[in-house]
Image: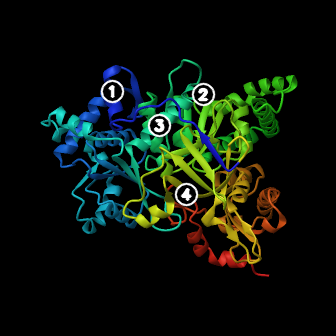
Amino acid sequence: MREFTNPPMASVPLVGGLADAVFDHALEDPLRIAFGRKTDGQWHDVTSGEFRDEVLALAKGLIAQGVRFGDRVAIMCRTRYEWTLFDFALWAIGAQVVPIYPTSSAEQVLWMLHDAQVSAAMVEHEDHAMTIGSVVDRLPQLRRLWQLDADAVGELNAAGRDIDDDVVHRHRRAVTPDSIATIIYTSGTTGRPKGCLISHANFMFESEVMVGRWEPVFHSKRGDEATTLLFLPLAHVFGRMVQIAAVRGRVKMGHQPNLNAAALLPDLAAFRPSFILAVPYIFEKVFNAARRKAEKDGKAGAFDKAVECAVRYADAMEARAFGTGPGPSAGLRMQHQLFDKLVYSKVREAMGGRVRHAMSGGSGMDRRLGLFFAGAGVTIYEGYGLTESTAAATANPPERTRYGTVGQAIPGTTVHIAEDGEIWLHGGNVFQGYLNNPKATDSTLHDGWLATGDIGALDEDGYLTITGRKKEILVTSGGKSVSPAQLEERVRDHPLVAQCILVGNDRPYIAALVTLDSEAVEHWLTMRRKPMLPPGDLVRDPDLETEVRRAVVAANTLVSQAESIRTFRILAHQFTEEHGLLTPSLKLKRKAIETVYSAEVEALYRS
């Protein structure tokens, strides 16, 4: 199949702007719990009426301090309640929000604030203020800087007390669907980040489709309250779409700024979301932590049997959904029921206990991992999208999930596979172009079609599989073209492996650089009673090398010998954003990695 169109749902008129939902919901049901807000270590409810009042007060303060309709205001902050508050207050007065990753360097901040001609910025704390302060002399258009941890909200609320409410409402009524809501800068894996112009209509289309089509999976069980804990970065389009869909879809939402397990798991247990939206990394962490605990308790064998049972059970359920099998046998159902009490319930408890559904995006998820979670009672609906498509362009439908794919085009969109395998998208979620960059816009948008730069294929039912990026295709000196993504992901399936990058452009064969997961390695050493060595010595451990070789051999079963990984090198340290080797969304900066590790790459090809 070369093209798949999913018809639109019942037409939803797109009028006004994103902030209207805040005021409409407060008018209809002011006592509905809209947010859980964590203060002083405790979760507190915020009603839709209270949130409306906070948005209105902040919007008045922003006007009082000089923010005008169409102004661009930056937010540099982790995921927290105040980001959502600022977003909707700025949209209420027709301002355009420019999100900045909190880990961005001073030069990255300078480029984005200068390119977007930002006139004001909200930062989380003093370190962010100092980052902007270090380049402020080159930003003559920047007039205001507010710091959250220095009571920015209180300062603005006080400034706006004498502004009449109707001033905000006049601004809000002037916002139209085609008004720009935000300018989100791409990660910049292949050069300077580009500012994506995303309109209110783009977000309204996306959120209406996601809520309308997937709302049933927002609940733990039929009729209960839909709640989600947002821990994705709000500087990324995925997190932003979740925020907007939750507000527009009346889903109670909490915020968690830390992705590390030590901070996230206690809040999942306390907030108890009914569903979550995450990247595959989170689900990998949950699975690997459960596997390590089982091994520590001397129950690794039982855990592995439970995993196999979950995979077979979910695989049989998938076959029944697609009419290719009868479903799980009686024996498998009995075995599955036993493991549900012994193993699967504990995995669900790690995610708060109520989660039965989740959505995953940002990168590909291994089919076996998806099958395991489905068999363990948490169905993960994998999807695909870009900043330029306002997050999801495809997603697995609730009733027929095909694991290992990113699903079908969402309602109202079309997926087309070009002659060279590139994925093209068309729909109301396609962005408006790149800021100040007509050349890049013209090469990406073609009569409303978005050329994604990703390579993929559609099966007979219109389910999309991503196989790589056009710009990342490796071509060996023998002329063999290799898409690295699939092999890299399979190597990463090994619990000891943190990252994998393939090299081989203009080389005689494909090779790999591999980094290690420090938590998994520490556990592996403890279980084998091996001493903890310095990283430089550890990577030369022959037993560890054997484990990584197993991962490479498993990956090579996916491809022909000419495309296989012939050799690899274990590195002492992971690729990090701080060293310029990862984007803020954790994508590999391939050219930068090959430059920094040029000596190691050369060593892979010495005879």
Marks 4 & 2, CB-CB < 8 Å contact:
no
Q: Which tag is nearer the camera, tag 4 or tag 3? A: 4
Q: Which of marks 4 and 2 is nearer the N terminus?
A: 2
Q: Residue at x 74, y 30 (%)?
A: 321
Give the residue type that dot 1 points to. Answer: Asp
Determine the residue positioned at 69% across, 39% down: 290
Marks 1 and 3, Cα distance to the nearest angstrom? 16 Å
| Mark closer to the chain start, 3 or 2 | 3
Q: What element carries label 4?
A: strand
Residue highlighted by disc 3 = 207
Q: What residue type is labelled 4?
A: Ala
Using the numbered discs, state the Cα–Cα distance from disc 2 to disc 1 in whole angstroms.
32 Å
CB under 8 Å between callouts 3 and 2?
Answer: no
For label 3, the crowd category at 10 Å Cα-Cα, with few meaning under 14, some 14 to 19 and many 20 or more, is many
Residue highlighted by disc 4: 451
Looking at the image, how many numbered discs can be counted on the residues? Answer: 4
Quarter of the figure that contains the C terminus? bottom right
Say which residue appears at 51% left-offset and 66% top-offset.
580
Which residue matches tag 2?
353
The correct choice, above or below, for 529 with respect to 312 in the image is below
Instruction: Say left or right for 203 vs 291.
Output: left
Distance between mark 4 and mark 2 Cα atoms: 41 Å
Q: Within the image, what quadrant is residue 283 found in?
A: top right
Q: Distance between the residues labelled 4 and 3?
A: 22 Å
Tell me residue 115's x, y (percent): 34, 63
Q: What residue type is labelled 2?
A: Gly
Nearest to the eye among marks 4 and 2: give it: 4
Amino acid at pointer 3: Ser
Give how far across and how far down residue 142 sits, in percent.
24, 59
Residue that badge 1 annotates = 24
- Mark 4 or mark 1, earlier in chain: 1
Dot 2 alpha-carbon crowd within 10 angstroms: few under 14, some 14 to 19, many 20 or more = some
